[in-house]
């Protein structure tokens, strides 16, 4: 036979695979696992880290099963090897019912398992930080949810705090140990609000309110980047935010509300979506000879002065 | 097996009983249809269309206000494409028919000039396609070099943001257009009739049309750059699309044009595979590559119309001020996302299945074993094709639309990995106790398996909604689909090219240079794209020109490797030019000792492939049996082939097949 019997090859393969898979999984879990992005700043970030780790622990043995087999085959059954014999064809080489059924069963079990795991991890943590549209079906259990509006426009994010008179800032501040609902919308094109260390991502669609939940844990800094191509300065559309202890956050929020009171009066009243006008759409929808405040073009919007 | 196929041939030629056609006026050769005349037609058509557009729309308020006339650009490009097609002679036949004349089909030409004009021979068209897709590939590759140059440094810039975003969009779009046809066009058209024992494609004129309109798409998408580029990337999301400048029109028209070509290529291949199989070529004997082309052609035919329709909506939004994609005016920006990805996800498998087919076709030849699990391979390809229509919303996981549908699309996306996994079962089963020959095609096929596994497993991460919250729209996605498309399809394409070029051109590619090409491409491909998984995990979104300082090392590793990856293609070009033109080495008829029907033909293959329709006796995977059968009865003189195939010295196979002279004994075109 070609370098040993069938079971001989099979046992050797399983042994190599088992050792490598166990070693890789254990090393990964203890050495890499705790440092996997996006970190542990919020509930959704730790959730994502946990999901990454579980998927990696499943993926390594699968990848190794294929690679170990290929490496073994490419070395042991190379045609240039001394004593290589002509392979056998015939029905046995064309298929093996047991192997085929085993393969399909195994892959199906893995896939269904990954699906059930993913669904639980999506539904239980209230959408896992992803945008759930205007009517979220998976909502947090907490009754104290801080709503914060994220407004994307070319090419910056601004944030409105309806709880504090609807003031608007360019720096996202969050209280620690609080469930937050991000209401993400856009004034022009599609953006995507990606608060990387928070484990939150939600597209900002014009005229749509896209809600994403997370629960902050300890204080810390995070980055917000636009992750949907939105035109010329997409690459420069980022800013930074902080999670502050609750008391500090409330001091900041109330003082900002007071400081910005005059500006807030000039803003459109807080709403979940905004129809773009000359202020919001960057002028892009309105060529120079079109009056952005005519009844036809703005669907009844009035200019800030009126 | 004395089955008389004369009846079927004469039935095919029953049209010959017509009275002889009126001879058309002879024109000098340079006036006839060819690429140069097509280019003149394209430029003239563009100028004419642009003028018409200015006449129609220059008075419109939005045109005067913006100084940009999208109507003129769209009409210019559309009529330019029509001019290109007219110049290439694509309208000669239908116009002559309308005029009541009976056009003569061109006589089969042996001159090299036949590669620059319209052809009805699927082998000529296949080689023309090869050149055009390589043009796409190298153009897109140069743009990729430009992107990686910009990303060498996180904050100092080579390009302005506008140029950078135009380059990114152009790279993505050109590569997607290329990848949708890179196997279907060159190898699909060239091989399918030979593999199924047909003298031609079902619709040779449609085949020529699909090639020439594909080439027109290349010119249209190139015009996007002088028109200012488009800022949307290859996905063209509205409403950014609606506010973009003139290059966007080139994107929309270009994709529609390419889409029409894809539909034509798709249904032509479908019709050919279903109807033109030789006697005895039952579904259980069809080569696995043909199964993959069948599944791909079905996707091309069924998915691409959505793209063409979406492109038309976009054109209307930009020219006639409709509001299909404008939320504030009653449209929806989700509509473009849905239409685009309803095409776009089957498109992803259009870019994967032919690669599977090539790999599954090559493995048995270089392992000297039958393909393991033929039925499961065919079922897997059909299964992937079917499921691919039910997964598109995983591109919209964070968009806010239909959150209740997410578990369903997570399930369908993960289910598709089951039939995709069959290809690994086939290759692994075929490797079991094989006798592996490390020829260049086999190396590329093995690398395809290696790369596609990484691409596929990372796809499962993306399909998991909670994990997708982090990786969606990041460099992780980018690395994932470069692993499947470039690492999978492009590697498979080169496997196929090295494997079939000796038959296509009659010349062998240099083995040493081929191995140099392989190793440099394989190593630097992985060094380019593997770091990008980490770049994405560490928070870098796609299509940005500025990134965090701490990601510079990984980005630089990727960039430098990308330059070497680009250089590896130069080895291929050098090898190709040297082996084909400078120092050609004639190829034996069957250099790899394959049992495939296409290898049982002489080199060069005569026009119309087979002097008579072969009778297929077995599938092409009878390796390793002592009672080897002949693959097909190619004619009376080939019956002595029995028993010669398994030992398969190339000369034995070649000497028993019909010669070119006998092949041209029946030069009547079957599509007169």
Image (cartoon, rainbow, N blue to C red):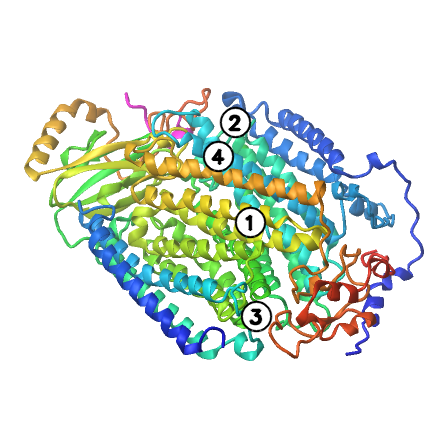
The residue identified by callout 3 is B369
Q: Are marks 3 and 1 on the same chain?
A: yes
Task: Identify the image quadrant of the C terminus of chain B.
Answer: bottom right
Q: Chain of mark 3?
A: B
Q: Of the two numbered discs 4 and 2 on the same chain, state the one appearing first in sequence.
A: 4
Label 1: element kind: helix
Q: Which residue is mark 4?
A: B145
Can residue B317 be seen at all in this image of the molecule?
Answer: no
Q: Is residue A268 left or right of residue B472?
A: left
Badge nearest the viewer, 1 or 4:
1
Label 2: few (<14), some (14–19) or many (≥20) C-alpha neighbours in 10 Å: some
Q: Find residue A226 and report its image quarter.
A: top left
Please state which of the two labelled residues, at mark 4 or mark 2, is closer to the viewer.
4
Q: CA distance from mark 1 to mark 2?
A: 41 Å
In the shown orientation, is residue B654 left or right of residue B104? left
The magenta region covers A293-306
Q: Which comes sooner in the sequence, label 1 or label 2?
A: 2
Q: Secondary structure at mark 3?
A: loop
Q: Front-most of B584 and B72? A: B584
Above or below for B560 versus A29:
above
Q: Nearer the viewer, mark 3 or mark 1?
A: 1
Q: Secondary structure at mark 2?
A: loop
**Residue, x 44% and y 54% (percent of image)?**
B392
Residue B10 or residue B425, whichever sits in front = B425
Residue B228 - label = 2
Does the magenta segment cover residue B296? no
Spot occupied by residue B570 in the image (x, y as percentages of width and height): 57, 39
Check disc 1 and report the residue beneath it.
B515
Q: CA distance from mark 3 to mark 1?
A: 23 Å
Picture quarter with the N terminus of chain B = bottom right
């Amino acid at each position: 036979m070609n370098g040993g019997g069938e079971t001989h090859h099979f046992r050797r393969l399983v042994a190599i695979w088992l050792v490598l898979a166990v070693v890789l999984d254990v090393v990964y879990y203890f050495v890499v696992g705790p440092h996997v992005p996006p970190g542990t700043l919020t509930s959704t970030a730790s959730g994502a880290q946990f999901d990454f780790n579980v998927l990696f622990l499943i993926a390594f043995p699968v990848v190794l099963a294929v690679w170990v087999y290929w490496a073994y085959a490419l070395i042991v059954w190379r045609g240039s090897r001394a004593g290589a014999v002509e392979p056998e064809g015939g029905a046995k080489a064309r298929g093996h019912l047991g192997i085929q059924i085993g393969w399909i069963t195994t892959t199906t079990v893995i896939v269904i398992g990954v699906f059930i795991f993913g669904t639980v991890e999506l539904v239980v943590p209230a959408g896992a930080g992803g945008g759930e549209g205007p009517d979220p079906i998976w909502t947090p259990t907490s009754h104290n949810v801080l709503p914060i509006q994220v407004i994307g426009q070319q090419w910056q994010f601004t944030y409105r705090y309806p709880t504090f008179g609807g003031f608007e800032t360019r720096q996202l501040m969050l209280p620690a140990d609080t469930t937050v609902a991000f209401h993400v919308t856009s004034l022009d094109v599609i953006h995507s609000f990606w608060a990387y260390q928070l484990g939150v991502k939600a597209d900002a669609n014009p005229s749509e309110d896209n809600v994403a939940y997370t629960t902050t844990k300890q204080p810390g800094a995070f980055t917000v980047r636009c992750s949907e191509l939105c035109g010329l300065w997409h690459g420069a559309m980022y800013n930074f935010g902080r999670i502050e202890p609750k008391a500090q956050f409330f001091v900041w929020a109330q003082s900002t509300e007071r400081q910005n009171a005059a500006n807030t009066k000039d803003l459109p009243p807080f709403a979940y979506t905004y129809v773009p006008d000359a202020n919001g759409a960057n002028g892009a929808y309105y060529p120079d000879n079109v009056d952005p405040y005519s009844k036809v073009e703005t669907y009844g919007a009035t200019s800030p002065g009126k | 097996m004395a089955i008389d196929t004369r009846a079927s041939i004469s039935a095919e030629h029953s049209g010959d009983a017509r009275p002889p056609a009126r001879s058309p006026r002879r024109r000098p050769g340079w006036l006839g249809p060819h690429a140069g005349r097509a280019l003149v037609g394209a430029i003239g058509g563009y100028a004419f269309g642009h003028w018409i557009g200015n006449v129609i729309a220059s008075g419109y308020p939005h045109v005067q206000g913006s100084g940009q006339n999208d109507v003129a650009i769209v009409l210019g490009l559309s009529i330019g494409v029509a001019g290109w097609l007219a110049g290439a002679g694509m309208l000669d036949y239908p116009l002559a028919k309308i005029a009541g004349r009976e056009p003569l089909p061109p006589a089969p030409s042996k001159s090299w000039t036949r590669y620059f004009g319209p052809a009805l021979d699927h082998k000529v068209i296949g080689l023309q396609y090869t050149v055009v897709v390589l043009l796409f590939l190298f153009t897109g590759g140069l743009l990729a070099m430009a992107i990686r140059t910009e990303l060498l440094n996180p904050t100092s810039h080579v390009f302005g943001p506008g140029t950078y975003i135009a380059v990114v969009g152009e790279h993505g779009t050109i590569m997607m257009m290329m990848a949708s046809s890179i196997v279907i066009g060159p190898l699909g058209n060239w091989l399918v009739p030979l593999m199924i024992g047909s003298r031609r494609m079902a619709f040779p004129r449609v085949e020529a049309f699909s090639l020439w309109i594909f080439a027109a798409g290349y010119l249209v998408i190139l015009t996007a750059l002088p028109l200012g580029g488009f800022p949307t990337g290859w996905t063209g999301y509205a409403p950014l699309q609606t506010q973009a400048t003139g290059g966007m029109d080139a994107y929309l028209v270009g994709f529609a044009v390419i889409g029409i070509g894809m539909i034509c290529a798709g249904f032509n291949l479908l019709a050919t595979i279903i109807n033109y199989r030789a006697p005895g070529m039952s579904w259980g004997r069809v080569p696995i590559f043909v199964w993959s082309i069948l599944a791909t052609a079905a996707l091309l035919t069924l998915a691409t119309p959505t793209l063409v329709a979406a492109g038309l909506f976009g054109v209307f939004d930009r020219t006639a001020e409709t509001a299909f994609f404008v939320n504030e005016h009653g449209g929806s920006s989700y509509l473009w996302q849905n239409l685009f990805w309803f095409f776009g996800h089957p498109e992803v498998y259009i870019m994967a299945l032919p690669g599977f087919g090539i790999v599954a076709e090559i493995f048995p030849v270089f392992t000297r074993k039958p393909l393991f699990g033929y039925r499961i391979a065919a079922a897997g390809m059909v299964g992937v094709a079917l499921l691919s229509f039910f997964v598109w919303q995983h591109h919209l996981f964070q968009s806010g639309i239909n959150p209740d549908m997410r578990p369903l699309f997570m399930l369908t996306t993960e289910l598709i990995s089951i039939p995709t996994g069959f290809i690994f079962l086939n290759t692994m089963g075929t490797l079991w106790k094989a006798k592996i020959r490390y020829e260049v095609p086999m190396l590329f096929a093995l690398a395809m398996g290696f790369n596609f596994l990484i691409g596929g497993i990372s796809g499962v991460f993306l399909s998991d909604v909670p994990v997708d919250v982090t990786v969606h729209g990041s460099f992780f996605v980018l690395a994932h689909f470069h692993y499947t498309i470039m690492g999978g399809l492009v590697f498979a394409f080169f496997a196929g090219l090295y494997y079939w070029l000796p038959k296509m051109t009659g010349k062998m590619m240099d083995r040493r240079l081929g191995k140099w090409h392989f190793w440099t491409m394989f190593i630097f491909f992985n060094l380019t794209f593997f770091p990008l998984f980490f770049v994405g995990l560490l928070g870098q979104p796609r299509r940005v020109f500025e990134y965090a300082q701490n990601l510079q090392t990984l980005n630089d590793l990727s960039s430098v490797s990308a330059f070497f990856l680009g250089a590896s293609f130069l080895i291929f070009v050098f090898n190709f030019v040297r082996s084909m033109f400078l120092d050609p080495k004639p190829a034996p008829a069957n250099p790899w000792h394959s049992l495939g029907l296409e290898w049982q033909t002489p080199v060069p293959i005569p026009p119309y492939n087979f002097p008579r329709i072969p009778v297929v006796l077995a599938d092409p995977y009878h390796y390793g049996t002592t009672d080897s059968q002949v693959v097909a009865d190619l004619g009376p003189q080939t019956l002595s082939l029995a028993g010669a195939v398994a030992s398969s010295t190339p000369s034995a196979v070649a000497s028993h097949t019909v010669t070119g002279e006998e092949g041209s004994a029946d030069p009547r075109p079957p599509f007169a």
